[in-house]
Image (spheres, rainbow, N blue to C red):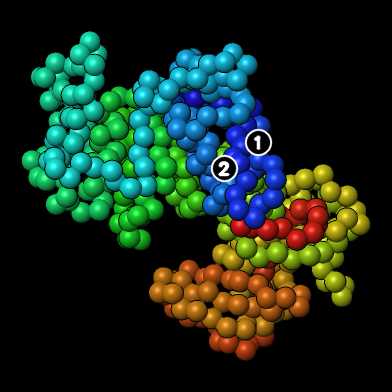
Amino acid sequence: MLTVNDLVKAFPPGKGEGRGRVLAVSDLSIEVKDGELFTLLGPSGCGKTTTLRCVAGLETPDGGEISVAGRVLFSSSQGTRVPANQRGLGMVFQSYAIWPQMNVFDNVAFPLKVLPRKRRPARKTIRERVERVLTVVKLDEVASRQATDLSGGQQQRLALARALVMEPPLLLLDEPLSNLDAKLRLRLRDDLRVILKQTGMTALYVTHDQAEAVVLGDRIGVMRDGKLLQMDTPDAIYNRPADLFVANFTGATNEIPGTLVSRNGEFGTVDFGEGRRGEVSLLHSLGPDEKVRIALRPENITIGQHNGANIFPARVLDRRYQGTQTAYGIELFGRRLEVVELGTAVRHQVGIETPVSLPRESCWAYRDTGPVSYE
């Protein structure tokens, strides 16, 4: 459905950035299948929104090619550039961008009513399409209400309905849930996937929220500094990160340095110092005596386990009760690590010495290339 090949986009330097253009997107290629929900995930400034704006026609790339359903929208080699208003794509922004003087029904119908006469549906068809899409987004009972009288979640569903009623071949969503409060955001996040799957829509969704990307996306592309680091299913991104940045950005915030002693297939033995050794998962071609950094999620460390592999003594430094879970800070191998335990009960006291377990399948070893910035 959507094919992006070797996309390049640069901007003039900002104040204090020196001379030369700033590369926002560098040789990026993605392919979104028909009916697929594809999420672009990454920190602010990584190029994900610039990529989406290039697809929408709101930015002009410096190189590459973009096509939707076989139709070339941009090609630097062919000299093709279809204006944004002729691409026929749907878009949902961070802000609701609704028309305050109209009611719900008229907001959704407006894009159809202003189409050129030859392309404009009949009045009966417009009503049927608007009523159908309002039912899908669960706004059919408030169709006559003024748009400004809706809640924040309803207004964002209204913005979604206005995009869906055009029946676009591709829907673009630029962090549409970022302006909602936390509880509403979670509820609408789940609703959004159901709505898009129900309509069979193909969508490109941009977010910096890892949980949003995992819940919404059939596949995820993780970006950093204008480059695509990994493109895979949520399960693969979460459980087999391509590098240390992807691991950390998706929640593996603990890092432990060590030296690889030996490997046995996908696993290896690492020396953490002072004769303490453990088994880890090797996702890359690492060899003996290489310096490595182990990435480990807080929820994958178990406190108080006495039996099994990778059991080490640790000390509880502090704890933060969070209702449905408790976060602990522990000292292990001379460094602080974070541990998260699910459940409403606090199980471990600050200051105690206790064994901890580091499952080898969840300890991912990467070549140590120095400090990594996660901004």
Q: How many labels does the image show?
A: 2
Q: Nearer the viewer, residue 18 or 307?
A: 18
In the displayed structure, does residue 20 sit left or right of residue 176? right
Helix, strand or loop under label 2: loop
Identity of the residue drawn at 54% across and 70% down? 340
Q: Earlier in the sequence, mark 2 or mark 1?
A: 1
The correct choice, above or below, for 165 with respect to 295 in the image is above
Q: Which amino acid does label 1 sit on?
A: Ser
Residue 375: x and y, percent? Answer: 61, 57
Q: Residues within 10 Å of mark 2 (few under 14, many from 20)?
A: many
C-alpha distance separating marks 2 and 1: 9 Å
Q: Which amino acid does label 2 sit on?
A: Gly
Q: Which of 225 and 186 is in front in this view?
A: 225
Q: Name the residue under label 1.
A: 26
Identity of the residue drawn at 58% across and 58% down? 251
Helix, strand or loop under label 1: strand
Q: Residue 56 falls in which quadrant of the image?
A: top left
Q: Mark 2 points at which residue?
A: 47
Residue 314: x and y, percent? Answer: 69, 79
Q: Residue 47 falls in which quadrant of the image?
A: top right
Q: Nearer the viewer, residue 114 or 277?
A: 114
Identity of the residue drawn at 60% across and 53% down? 15
- Hey, which residue is sitting farthest top in the picture? 118
Whether pointer 2 and pointer 1 mark residues with C-beta atoms closer than 8 Å, the reply is yes
Residue 93: x and y, percent? Answer: 36, 42
